[in-house]
Image (spheres, rainbow, N blue to C red):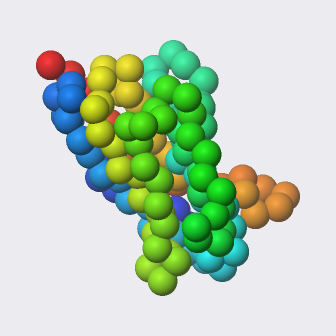
Amino acid sequence: QVHLVESGGALVQPGGSLSLSCAASGFSFKTYTMSWYRQAPGKERELVASIAAVVPGQIRYANSVKGRFTISRNNARNTVYLQMSSLNPEDTAVYYCSVVIPPERYWGQGTQVTVFS
């Protein structure tokens, strides 16, 4: 059974930093691309970053987070990370870890990130 558990969400001031983690289980973690998505109130869920299975593999970022966020993975620990810096109020959202294992996409429960002054 695929299980994704995010952690690390918090309240943070603008300009601050935060690190999210996603612990995965129930599948061969090192085989699959892992992604972070986010969903702000009243908005659609959007891709934040993804990292391919093989490190250093293909990494993609949303334009809105390029240069501020860094995705990484530790295949030995079955964990994917999202290091966020220079946070601004527009980054406020629930952040989700996700994996596609055909034919399904799996989601974690999400972790709340709130940027406020």
Asked whether the viewer can see residue 67, the reply is yes
Asked whether the viewer can see residue 5, the reply is no
Q: Residue furthest right?
A: 103
Q: 63 and 48: which one is in front?
A: 63
Q: Residue at x 62, y 76 (%)?
A: 30
Residue 101: x and y in percent read 76, 63
Q: Residue furthest top?
A: 42
Quarter of image, res 13: top left
Q: Residue at x 26, y 27 (%)?
A: 115
Image quadrant occupied by the N terminus: bottom right
Residue 75: x and y in percent read 52, 77
Is the residue 66 above or below the residue 18 in the image?
A: above
Is the residue 94 above or below the residue 32 in the image?
A: above
Q: Residue at x 29, y 31 (%)?
A: 87
Q: Residue at x 63, y 64 (%)?
A: 57
Is the residue 79 above or below the residue 81 in the image?
A: below
Left or right of 113 in this view: 51: right
